[in-house]
Amino acid sequence: MEAPAKAPEGNADGGDPASSAASSSGRILNGGWQSDKDVTARRKMIAKIVALLQQRKPNAPEEWLLKLPQMAKRLEESLYRSAADFDSYNDVSTLKQRLQALAMSIGLKTQQQKKQQAAQAAAAAGGQPTVVNMQQINPAMTANPNANADGLPNVAPTTLNANHSMAAGNLQPGQQAPANGDGAAAAGTANNTNRQQVLRHQQQRLLLLRHAAKCPHENGKCPVTPHCAGMKRLWKHIAECKDQKCQVPHCVSSRYVLSHYHRCKDARCPVCMPVREAIHRSHEKAKQMNMLKQQHEQQMQGYYGEPANKRQKKGGLKMDPRKFGQRGKGGKGGIPHMNVGNAYRQQTRNPYGGYPYGYAQPMFQRPPQVLMPLVTQGAKSVEDQTLINTFTVEEIENHIASLNQSIVMSPGQLKSRCLDILSNIQKHQFGWVFNQPVDPVELNLPDYFEIIKRPMDLGTIKKRVENGCFHDIDTFKADCHLTFDNALNYNAKGSPVYNMALDVKKAFDKEYEKVMRELNAEHNKKCDNGEACSLCGMEKKLFEPAVFYCNGANCPSKRIRRNSYFYVAGNNQYHWCHQCFTELKEDGINLPDIQIKKSELGRNKRKNDDQPEESWVACDTCGRWIHQICGLFNTRQNKDQRSKYECPKCTIVTRKKKGSLGPTSQTKTATDLPRTRLSEFIEHHIRQKSIDKYKELAAEKAQSEGISLEEATKTFDNAGAITIRQVTSMDRTIATREGFKKRYKFKNYPDEFSYRCKCLVVFQEIDAVDVMLFGLYVYEHDEKNPKPNSRCVYVSYLDSVHYMQPRKIRTFIYHEILISYLDYVRHRGFATAHIWACPPLKGDDYILYAKPEDQRTPKDQQLRQWYIDMLDVCKDRGVVKSVTNMHELYFNDPKNDATIIPYLEGDYWVGEAENIIKELEDGGKKGKKGDASKRKGIKAQGGNNSRGGTRSTGLDEDALIASGIIDPPPKSLEDGGKDILMQK
């Protein structure tokens, strides 16, 4: 909450509030034009101030140069806050004069403060002080400085002028001024004493307001302070009050002190500094208490997180393993998707030993799921404002290298650079030899494919570059080297082709190094530019724009187009496009948590053109500005803005000077997230399979490139560790829709189905940072669910980004995650698994809405084949018994009706079935109406010639049906007829 910047009337030093604000180092904003969008201009201004000060003092000592960035930041802050408007602030022609005036103002204030301190010291030594009433300092203060009628500490509204100084106030009528110097000295001493009291009251007010905003206790029941109830009432009032002359006690003064605290950046402020330190101490104490509590809980728990008393209670319980195996028999009364028969009995043991999850347990019984991290010895885990402090010097250097834009290029830049290199190499005098694939038949090389396992040529590489198959320049270099290494491995040393390959390879390396030097020079030039990040060299690092979905009736859940207008309500939770807004009723909108009128909604009109930009942070050592993401700076851990930040480059220099190359703190990582039995099972499986996969890749690399196995293995040593955690486990229900429920009411179809929703995420450590690469949502319907959902799991959503290293193991890892999950649920006794194999539509995403530019969405057939390849491996391992699809399993048999298809949350079938039922109902009504009108027409045409009575027309419908001339009418669904819904 922020109070108005203008100070209330009744300044403590008897002057005008505006003038005192203007002469107070600019801490109170002048003009109200300042905003967060001025960051770029402010950085440029700081750079200009630094350059100007260096010109005035070219031979400055090193100590002065080290302090220069902080000095320039303080001067810029004063100019920024005191400027009348942005143009005045950004005027370079008057910068020198404004700095000179600011320096003179600071010098005069310093002299005045020294004189006041000297006078106070002399007065203290010259006579006995006399007590001065608080009314002499500020008439707004009551006779009791500690409390008022409400029992709340008082705060003088205007004692918070910008330089935090307080002079003796004007005497009130009826008071006499002291007649001699002793009296004046006594008044000065009393003034200093009362200033301390006022400062203490202001600090108490801030702390009490903060407590009232966070206190969960009801009024009068707070055990911390008796002022809580009064402060809560005050907090509720000032949250909505904007009256600068409000008569409610303490409203104006509280808003003013909060406004000052919100804007104050002075680390030595006598009001704010003690409050921030108190809050900081409170946070540290709470962290220490939580850490001690966690350590105690970990010590009291075993490996699987079960308290000792629970383990003792379970100690006497013995389950019959045979019963557990028998419960896994599937197929009876279910859908034979998964093998839970003989393969289950053969594989009931797992790598942990014993039965699945380490102990024999009845199927579907849910044991304690969360597994606490193991207690490890090492540095104490501390939440730091930057991850850089948790890195070694080598890791910091690798992180800086990863930000080099000469390596990280856009697809267009990468394509251009690679084609330039290829063009020069193909023009080489021997380049023609390697432009086409080797033809063993034409060249009579029968053993070529026995020696060369992975053929490559420059023509194939060029096609791959043009099709955007390369994602980084290192992969392009590796393929080019493979072309020449194949020739060197196959041909004898000294042969013509061997010598040609050697010459062209040297020419390629020369061209490659030339391009890399150019890229590095461009990158270094950008980093040295004062307007760009000194780590990545980019001026702006833009985020993917936020996606907004319309809540209107005409286009529910559809994306709101970019650069179009829309309307916002409910704390940015609800949105309406322009078309849906115009069709809203005037009386208002009723939502689950808010009610809003159309006129009020119309005031919240926005344009969907925001382009979020990464925030900046300045190094307190060198003064350079860098992106927060580049410096791994966590602004959430810098709430009190007291943290000192050192950029990665300065951190390396500091540690090398101290001789300390290791991390200085330990922040929690992905491995510290709570573990569950499911995540442990899958993670253990992935780690074992990854080791085998890396050995296989190393062997292939050694054979194809003609290098030793040890050298090939080293190329995979830098692959980061993979961490898998379950982050969601919630019980949910899906209600049967009205049309479906009404149609199959005669079958007692369930009204709802319950299920357990789980979410798994995959992290990989890349450049010492845990990066989330993959997400998976699954829904589990246990045996308590009625048919058709009993004992089935639904793989609902999965999504990924292609940053996994090495990239060639992405598919392997994701397949193994799904295989291990199906194996896990098979052990638990689930019978069927259903997978929704459909890619998202263009512009939509399932989990991760921001993807790399060069990551493509697979097409329908590609995605289906991706799943089929995974399921084939499951069949080979005995995890899955059979693989089928909905059409073969449900729709091929005409006797089946729609009640045998599982009713799953988010599935396409659920919505499509409801649409078809509605179409059938509407079509039936139209048909009946048409038949009736047809009959009326016939009667009208032949009404005069028709014969009455009971004479037969000559057509016996039953006889025609019996003779087979016409088909009998279809049976109803209740009588066992075909389900038209399945035919549709």
Image (cartoon, grey):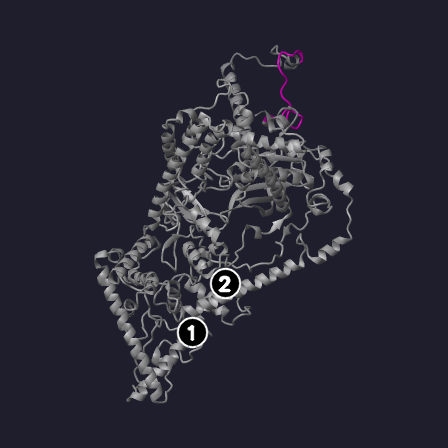
Of residues 236 and 448, the one drawn nearer to the viewer in this rendering: 448
**In the rendering, at what x and y percent does residue 685 appear?**
63, 42
Q: Is residue 320 magenta?
A: no
**In the rendering, at what x and y percent does residue 468 appear?**
43, 32
**In the rendering, at what x and y percent does residue 316 appear?**
78, 53
**In the rendering, at what x and y percent does residue 671 appear?**
57, 51
Residue 587 visible somewhere in the drawing: no
**Residue position for label 1:** 201
Count of residue discs: 2
Rendered residue at 77%/43% (across/down) = 321
The N terminus appears in which quarter of the rendering? bottom left
Q: Residues within 10 Å of mark 1 (few under 14, many from 20)?
A: many
Mark closest to the chain's N terminus, 2 or 1:
1
Point out the stretch of residues depicted in magenta.
Answer: 962-980
> Residue 819, relative to residue 928: is it above or below?
below
Label 2 to label 1: alpha-carbon separation? 20 Å
* Residue 214 numbered tag: 2
Q: Amino acid at mark 2?
A: Lys
Q: Amino acid at mark 1?
A: His
> Residue 714, relative to residue 660: is it above or below?
above
